[in-house]
Amino acid sequence: MLKKKIGMIVLVLITVFALVLPVARAAETDTETDTNTSENQVTSTEEESNFKQGDVYLTGDDITIDYIIDGNLFVFADTVTINSQIGGDAFILANTVTIGNQGYVFSNLFTVANTVNVQGVVYDLYALSNDVTITGYVYRDIRVSGNNLNIYGTVGRNAYVTCNNMNFAQDGTNETEETTTLSSQGMINGNLEYSSKNEITIPDGTVTGEVKYNQIKATNTRTMQSYLISLGTIIATAILVWLICLWLAPKFVKKSNLIDKKSILPEIGLGILTPIVLLIVSIVLILLGITSSFGLLLVAISFILMGLSTSIFIIAINNLICNKLKIQKNIGNFGMLIVTAAVLWLIGLIPVVGSIVGIIAIIIGLGILVYYLIKKEKPNKDEKTKETK
């Protein structure tokens, strides 16, 4: 029986990685697969229409969105082009992302891609990309980490950037076109805070606020490959833990939540006390000599629990989001789990804030796990009646 279950896990993991990491290719280049979070499936009539209600999930090779989406957009593809209005947030993992001249993202654009081109309008931009080019308009802030940033359009407020090169359009020319054409000057209508190996020359008049430079030491530089490996690791770990919990403890997956008033304080307390208690007991067992092997085993268990805690925290946040969005099916939970893990990873890149969030994730995640393991769940009324019968 155990061999069969292990075989099932291996098959599930192979299927997951086949779908997530290489990005599933469509049978035809014009074929797109989307899933609405509502109870009803998207019909062929809705696919041909110019308006879609609710969240949309897409995977494929080359995807072009030329219809209005009144909700959030989730895309995993090679090339993504948006030529219409997106009413909510857009979460995109792709090689090339283009917001066309007619593209309009009313909320945030979260993207991990090799190349990002913003020709239309975006409210807030969060990008991890090798090359980012803005020829359109970003209403508020941009948070960009990558190699090259080209600002040939306008950033409405502040820019927080980590890059090696930064270029601004000058003298009313657009350098991205094959032929020089007139365009507005690249502008940041707020503050610019950037980190780079060397200080970058910022043209006069391109930043209306303050410019702050943070030097990156050579020992702290990270390549694009290391970022992608880090992102893939946190997503794969969260998926693996979610699948194991779904198999061994489905009730835990469904009930783990961050806003349970009865359990939040005990969970935080357990998350803080458990590592301390395990450390003290391990030291005592090791010092006794005879029980040193048990002490080392307890240390290993402590590290395993600490490693699982972040994934448990991601699962708890994902359950909270899915409950708010009324996502009940496992496929919807799975897609949102990937997004939740990616967003938490992006937050972890923010200096100071990322470290604080990481510590909180470990404490609460560990507390949720330990609380579930030690608590005695009371049977429901239906279970009691069954037992009496």
Image (cartoon, grey):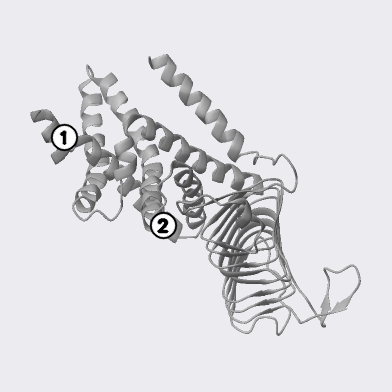
Find residue 343 and report its horizontal and vertical position in percent: 50, 54
Circle 1 packing at 10 Å, graded few (<14), some (14-19), many (20+), is few
Q: Which of marks 2 and 1 is in front?
A: 1
Q: Which of 361 and 329 is in front in this view?
A: 329
Q: Which residue is drawn at 26% across and 21% down?
A: 294
Left or right? Give the position of 386 relative to 344.
left
Q: Residue at x 50, y 24 (%)?
A: 10
Q: Where 194 sits versus 356, above or below?
A: below
Circle 2 packing at 10 Å, graded few (<14), some (14-19), many (20+), is few
The answer to whether residue 190 shows anywhere in this view is yes
**Which SS class for mark 2?**
helix
Residue 353: image quadrant is bottom left
Residue 86: image quadrant is bottom right
Give the residue type at disc 2. Answer: Leu
Distance in Å between CA atoms under marks 2 and 1 = 30 Å
Kindly identify which residue carries mark 1: 383
Label number found at residue 312: none
Q: Where 287 sits versus 306, above or below?
A: above
Find residue 183 and report its horizontal and vertical position in percent: 80, 80
Residue furthest to the left? 388
The answer to whether residue 213 shows anywhere in this view is no
Kindly identify which residue carries mark 2: 325
Left or right? Give the position of 282 relative to 343.
left
| Quadrant for the C terminus in the image | top left
Find residue 159 and report its horizontal and vertical position in percent: 60, 72
Find residue 155 and report its horizontal and vertical position in percent: 64, 76
Q: Which of 150 and 50 is in front in this view?
A: 50
Mark sitting earlier along the chain (2/1): 2
**Which SS class for mark 1?**
helix
Give the residue type at disc 1. Answer: Glu
Residue 151: image quadrant is bottom right
